[in-house]
Amino acid sequence: MEDQINKYFDLAEYLLDKIKERKNFEVVLDKPEFTNICFWYVPNSIKDLDRNSKEFKERLNKVAPKIKERMVIEGNLMISYQPLDDKPNFFRMIVSNPASNFEDIDYMINEIERFGNDL
């Protein structure tokens, strides 16, 4: 059991590192809680907007739902999203599947990027 829990934490840390490496991904909280990683995909179309502007927040709020819709239609991933207080919708990935591995994390990030690239 300890090995499995350690694996979850390793995968969560790997996901966090990968998010920080990608130019269109941003973490919501720098210090994640357990294996719960919260992040945004920020498309190039809004990347240069003022982060505090109403326009930026409104447009970013629509990104995660649109990407999830595309995932569901294609049938390859299902990742939850939610807002928090005044923060726009963000992806909330909880690493807890015993079959998950590093390749799955890479695949997920690549798919989010693919689905959000034209937004």
Image: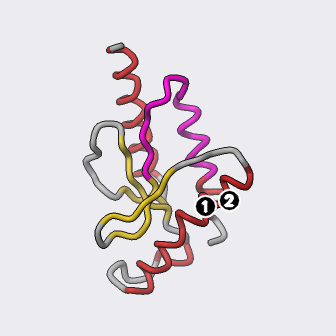
In the image, 77 versus 31, the foreground residue is 77
Give me the C-alpha separation between circle 2 and circle 1.
Answer: 5 Å
Mark 2 element type: helix
Residue 74 higher or lower than 5, as above or below: below
In the image, 70 versus 13, the foreground residue is 70
Q: Residue furthest right?
A: 74
Asked if residue 101 lies in the magenta stretch, the reply is yes
Give the color scheme: rainbow, by chain, secondary structure or one colour: secondary structure
The x and y percentages for residue 15 are 44, 41
Q: Quadrant of the C terminus?
A: bottom right
Residue 49 higher or lower than 6, as above or below: below
Residue 78 higher or lower than 117, as above or below: above
Q: Which residue is disc 2 drawn over?
A: 70
The x and y percentages for residue 88 are 40, 70
Q: Which residue is disc 1 drawn over?
A: 67
For the point 67% across and 53% down, the residue is 72
Query: Callout 1, which amino acid?
Result: Ile
Query: Callout 2, which amino acid?
Result: Arg
The x and y percentages for residue 27 are 37, 56
Q: Residues within 10 Å of mark 2 (few under 14, many from 20)?
A: some
Asked if residue 59 lies in the magenta stretch, the reply is no
Report if the CB atoms under discs 2 and 1 are less than 8 Å apart: yes
Q: Quadrant of the N terminus?
A: top left
For the point 74% across and 51% down, the residue is 74
The x and y percentages for residue 24 are 50, 62
User: Magenta span covers which residues?
Assistant: 92-111
For the point 58% across and 35% down, the residue is 104
